[in-house]
Image (cartoon, coloured by chain):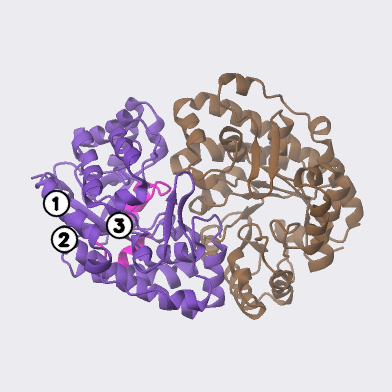
Chain colours: A brown, B purple
Amino acid sequence: MNDLFLRACRRELVERPPVWMMRQAGRYLPEYRAVRERADFLTMVGTPELAVEVTLQPVDRLGVDAAIIFSDILVVPQAMGMALSVDEGVGPRFHQPLRSPGDFARLRDIVPEQHLGYVLDALRLARRALDGRVPLIGFAGAPWTLMSYMVEGQGSKSFTQAKRLLVQDPARAHALLARLAQAVGAFLVAQVAAGAQAVQLFDSWASALGPRDFREFALPYLAEAVRLAKAAGVPVIAFAPGAGWALEEIARATGADVIGVDWQTDAEDARRRLAGLPVALQGNLDPGWLYASPGEIRTRTRDMLAAFGGRSHIANLGHGINPDVPVSQAQAFIDAVKEWRIP
Amino acid sequence: MNDLFLRACRRELVERPPVWMMRQAGRYLPEYRAVRERADFLTMVGTPELAVEVTLQPVDRLGVDAAIIFSDILVVPQAMGMALSVDEGVGPRFHQPLRSPGDFARLRDIVPEQHLGYVLDALRLARRALDGRVPLIGFAGAPWTLMSYMVEGQGSKSFTQAKRLLVQDPARAHALLARLAQAVGAFLVAQVAAGAQAVQLFDSWASALGPRDFREFALPYLAEAVRLAKAAGVPVIAFAPGAGWALEEIARATGADVIGVDWQTDAEDARRRLAGLPVALQGNLDPGWLYASPGEIRTRTRDMLAAFGGRSHIANLGHGINPDVPVSQAQAFIDAVKEWRIP
C-alpha cells in the first residue's frame, strides 16, 4: 500500500514527495483517447465503469502516487437541474444559463446519493479496483467557480454576466453561493463515504475576481465547503488557481489541510509565505514545461522540488496537463519526482 | 491646457489624480459604433482621419484627462510582414503564425516612418486636433506579448505554441524578442517625434508566464523597450496585467516612469510595495464594477483613489473597458475621480 500521498497531506515524514497530475486521466493518454472514441465526455463521466477505467489508466501507465476520480466539476449544477453539453472544441456549456430570478428559483437542492449516485458508484468501483495500490481522490468545484459557470453558461474571458450579478444583485449571488457551499460540502462528504481518501476543491475561476470580490464572493464559500468536507475526516485540498496572492488567506480562512499552488506562483515564495501555517503544499510545475525534452523536464522538476523543500509537499503540475503532451514527457516528470530524495 | 496627466506621470504636485480609461476609444461609445459601422476595425486603425476621430471621442464626451491614439498592438508584427485579420467575435488573427525557422527568417525589420507611417500620421493629426486640451498617449505591445501572438496566431488560453517555443528553442525566442524590443523601442521614439506626449507599453499576456519564464522572456525585453523609449524624453508607462506579483521587479528592471496596476492587484498593496521607488502608479478599478449603479461606482472609485493615496497616481481601470458598459456608468467613474480631492 503506497500511502505516501496521504502521509504528505497530513505533513507526516515521507522519504520523497508523492506525485500526481491534475487532469492525469486525460487526452494525452492514448488509452484515454481509445475510450473517448467509444463514448463522449459526459457519457464517460456518467458511466461508472468507463470513469473507473480512465481513472486507473495513469496509475497503471505512469505510476502516479494517487488516483483522482474521473468526473467534472459541473456535475453539481447539472444535478441541480441545469442541462449541460460538452462539445469537442467548444467546452462545457449550460443550455440555459441563470439570468432571471426564476432561473435561480428553479434550481433544486441536491441529495448526493440520489442525484449524483453515478459519481459515488464510480468512487466505490474505483476504490475496489485500486485495491489499495494508491489512495483515491474525490473532488468538486468551489461555489464561486460553479456559480460563475452557471451564470455565464460557458467559459468566458471577462465574466461579464457573473460580474454583473455580483454588483447588481449581490444578495442573490450570496444566496446561491451559500446553497452551492452546502451542496458541494454534502457531495464531498458523500464522496468520502463512497471511498474517496482525500478530496480537492477547485476554485478554477478565482482569477476572475479582484481581491475585494474574492474575499466577499469566493473565499467564504470555499471555506464553508472545506469546513463541511473536513467533517468526513480525510485531508481536504483547496486550489484556487490565479489567486496566488491569497495563499495565506486561503490557508487561514479555509483550514484546508493542503493548499494548491498554481504555476504562476513562485514555489519558494509560496513556501516562505505559508511556512508558519499547518498546511502541506501541492504543485506546481508549469504544464507548458512538459513540452521540453525529458532531460530538461527532469532538471526543472528537481528545481521545483528543491524550492518546496521536500517536506509537506505533494508534487503536481500547477494546472491540468495539456492534451498534446507526449506521454514520455509526462513520465519524465513523474520519474523525476520518484527519483528525487529530500536533501 | 490640462497637463494633470503629465504632471502625475512625473510625480509632480497635482490637485487631484488625472483619469483616463484603457480602451476609452471603444465600442461602449455610440459615436464609436457609428464610425465602426462605416469601416472595419483595421480600416479604422489604418486610416488616420478615422483613428483621430475616435481618439477624440472620449475627450469630447467624457472629459478624460488624456487621449490615447486609436491603434492596435499588432500593427508592429503586421508591419514586419505578417498578414492580419480582425473579425467580429473572433478577434485578431495572423494568417500564418510563426512555426518554422523560415517563418522567423521572413520577418522584416521595420522603419517606423516607412512601415507604420499611418500611425504616426494619426498621432500628428490627433495632436493638432487636440490643440492642447489634454495630452496624447502613444503605445505599443511589449515584445513577449507580440511574440506570443505571432507564434500562436491568435488569442489562446494555454499558449501551447508559444510555450513550446520557449522550452524547445529558447535561442530562437530570444532572437525574436530582441528584434521586437528594437522595433517597439524605435516605434515609440517615432511616436513621440510625431506628437505623443507619453507612451505606454502593454505586456498584455504577461499572465501566460510563470515567474521564471517572465524573468527570462518578458521582463528583459520590456525593460529594453522602455529604455529605448525613454530616450525620447517623455514619460513611459509599463503595464503587465496578470503579473501583479512582479510590480517591484518591473519598476526596478524597466526604469519606467509609471507602473500600471491591474484590477486583480490590491491597490494598497501595490502602493505599499512600490512606495520607495521613483514611479507613479496607474490603475486600477475593476472594469466589471462599471456594471454597478452610478452611485456604487462613485463609492468604489473613491475607495480606489483613497487606497492609492492621490499622489503620483493616474486613475484608470485595471484593464480595458468592456464594450457593453453604458456610457453613463463610464461617466460616473470619470466624474468620481474629477470630484475627488486628495485628503
**Along the viewing direction, whichever of A210 and A237 lies nearer the viewer:** A210
What residue is at 69 percent from the left and 43 percent from the top?
A86
Which amino acid does the dot numbered 1 rest on? Arg
Residue A298 lies, in percent from the top left, at 65, 77
Provide the residue designation for mark 1.
Answer: B127
Q: Is residue A331 left or right of residue B337?
A: right
**Along the viewing direction, whichever of A211 and A173 lies nearer the viewer:** A173
Disc on res. B259: 3
**Along the viewing direction, whichever of B205 and B39 lies nearer the viewer:** B39
Which amino acid does the dot numbered 2 rest on? Ala
Labelled pair 2, 1 in contact (Cβ < 8 Å): yes
Assess disc 1: are there few (<14), some (14-19) or many (≥20) residues with their C-alpha within 10 Å of its C-alpha: many
Which amino acid does the dot numbered 3 rest on? Ile
Marks 2 and 1, how far apart in space?
8 Å
Labelled pair 2, 3 in contact (Cβ < 8 Å): no
Q: Is residue B199 left or right of residue A138?
A: left
Q: Is residue A281 above or below residue B181?
A: above
Magenta residues span: B247-272
Label whose residue precedes the other's in the sequence (2 or 1)? 1
Q: Is residue B295 above or below residue A13?
A: above
Query: Do tags 1 and 3 sit on the same chain?
Result: yes
Query: Do tags 2 and 1 sit on the same chain?
Result: yes
- Which one is closest to the eye, mark 2 or mark 3? 2
